[in-house]
């Protein structure tokens, strides 16, 4: 009888032990039937594929060979890497109830890549705004000096700044594990770095981007009012020529139009400059949509991130739930740009359609000799 009682006590102890351990593991095991993960997988797929199409288009299409599109191509590389390296790890964390199931060494590296690519995105948009403002303010000097080599140097500078700003994260994480882990979740836990980094890597470039964009629109409006309005026939004819070009005129065509200004009669000169200004205004509208969506999608995350860094242990649980949502809103912005180019630019749209059909060469069109 005593032996039977001892056996029952042993079973009861073992049962309580396995139940307690199972309850601990239950919080970290993958959740079942997580339908949201299917939606996230679709976002990842379209982000990677869409940005690969942008990279291919700028690389192959001669009409897209200009400074702004080179910047957009580099931006697409950052967005593609977000979909390829950052989003999948974040999805795995969601499936494990926002805990980190991967090796601890990968956590600081993942945060580093996350911060790097988001910083690179805002730096690219800031550089595009600044570059375009300089080009609009002094178009003749800009047209002579904006060579491919200098554009590549600017892009390398953008990536270098982004890497330098993000590099302290893996250093902090490898030195102190608590800097990147909070209750089993892989998050940056260094309030001072969050505050300074958010200001330097997001809010300051955002202000520069908005100011430069406003000044660009203002200068374009001034240039537009300085030229007399041409007849509808001339406007319609020249518009038909330039509608099929890239987001901006190609670099070579910009140079040609600049030389024509000096050689052509005054009336033709005014027509060329007026059309070029209209071209820049259309491009500014497309870039304005890109800037606006990036601002709307990333600003809530950075504001919430700063609030959490300020309140620290006294933060409400609502903030943590919001930041888990806002970070994915920011990730979605990486997949939005190819959609914008498709909707608002015919060259990108036609290129994407050909690439999806495995046709990578530009279609040769018969040139008409009709002079408008």
Image (tube, helix red, strand yellow):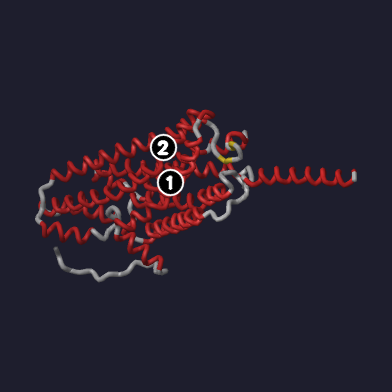
Q: Relative to 157, is 133 on the left or the right?
A: left
Q: What is the quadrant of the C terminus in the image?
A: bottom left
Residue at 43 percent across and 45 percent down: it is: 330
Q: Name above or below for residue 181 compared with residue 74.
A: above
- Element carrying mark 1: helix
Q: How many marks?
A: 2
Q: Is residue 49 visible?
A: yes
Q: Relative to 85, is 213 on the left or the right?
A: left
Which label is found at residue 312? none
> What distance separates the C-alpha of mark 2 from that of mark 1?
16 Å
Q: Relative to 327, is 248 on the left or the right?
A: left
Q: Position of residue 243 (x, y in %)?
A: 24, 59
- Element carrying mark 2: helix
Q: Residues within 10 Å of mark 2 (few under 14, many from 20)?
A: many
Residue at 43 percent across and 49 percent down: it is: 332
Q: Which residue is mark 1?
A: 329
In the image, 261 versus 178, the foreground residue is: 178
Residue at 35 percent across and 46 percent down: it is: 293
Q: Residues within 10 Å of mark 1 (few under 14, many from 20)?
A: some
Mark 2 or mark 1: whose residue is earlier in sequence:
2
In the image, 211 versus 91, the foreground residue is: 91
The answer to whether the residues at label 2 and label 1 have Cβ atoms under 8 Å apart is: no
Which label is found at residue 202? 2
Q: Position of residue 251 (x, y in %)?
A: 29, 53
Q: Position of residue 102 (x, y in %)?
A: 62, 47
Q: Position of residue 298 (x, y in %)?
A: 41, 42
From the image, state whether disc 2 or disc 1 is nearer to you.
Answer: 1
Q: Is residue 261 visible?
A: no
């Amino acid at each position: 009888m005593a032996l039977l009682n001892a056996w029952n006590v042993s079973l009861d102890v073992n049962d309580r032990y396995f139940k307690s351990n199972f309850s601990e593991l239950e919080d970290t095991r993958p959740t079942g039937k997580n339908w949201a993960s299917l939606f996230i997988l679709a976002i990842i797929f379209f982000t990677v594929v869409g940005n690969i199409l942008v990279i291919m288009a700028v690389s192959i299409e001669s009409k897209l060979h200009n400074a702004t599109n080179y910047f957009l191509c580099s931006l697409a590389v950052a967005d593609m890497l977000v979909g390829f390296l950052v989003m999948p790890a974040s999805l795995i964390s969601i499936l494990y109830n926002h805990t980190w199931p991967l090796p601890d060494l990968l956590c600081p590296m993942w945060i580093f890549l996350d911060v790097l690519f988001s910083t690179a995105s805002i730096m690219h948009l800031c550089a595009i705004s600044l570059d375009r403002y300089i080009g609009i303010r002094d178009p003749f000097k800009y047209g002579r000096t904006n060579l491919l080599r200098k554009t590549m140097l600017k892009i390398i500078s953008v990536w270098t700044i982004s890497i330098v700003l993000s590099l302290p994260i893996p250093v902090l994480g490898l030195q102190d594990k608590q800097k990147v882990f909070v209750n089993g979740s892989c998050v940056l836990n260094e309030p001072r770095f969050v505050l300074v980094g958010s200001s330097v890597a997001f809010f300051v470039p955002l202000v520069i981007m908005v100011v430069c964009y406003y000044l660009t629109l203002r200068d374009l409006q001034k240039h537009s009012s300085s030229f007399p309005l041409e007849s509808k026939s001339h406007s319609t004819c020249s518009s038909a020529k330039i509608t099929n070009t890239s987001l901006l005129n190609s670099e070579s065509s910009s140079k040609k139009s600049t030389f024509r200004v000096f050689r052509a009669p005054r009336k033709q000169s005014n027509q060329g400059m007026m059309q070029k200004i209209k071209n820049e205004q259309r491009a500014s509208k497309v870039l304005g949509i890109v800037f606006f969506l990036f601002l709307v999608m990333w600003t809530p995350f950075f504001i919430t991130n700063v609030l959490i860094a300020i309140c620290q242990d006294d933060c409400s649980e609502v903030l943590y739930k919001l930041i888990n949502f806002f970070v994915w809103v920011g990730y979605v912005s990486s997949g939005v740009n190819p959609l914008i180019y498709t909707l608002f630019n015919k060259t990108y749209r036609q290129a994407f359609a050909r690439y999806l059909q495995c046709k990578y060469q530009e279609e040769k069109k018969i040139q008409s000799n009709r002079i408008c």
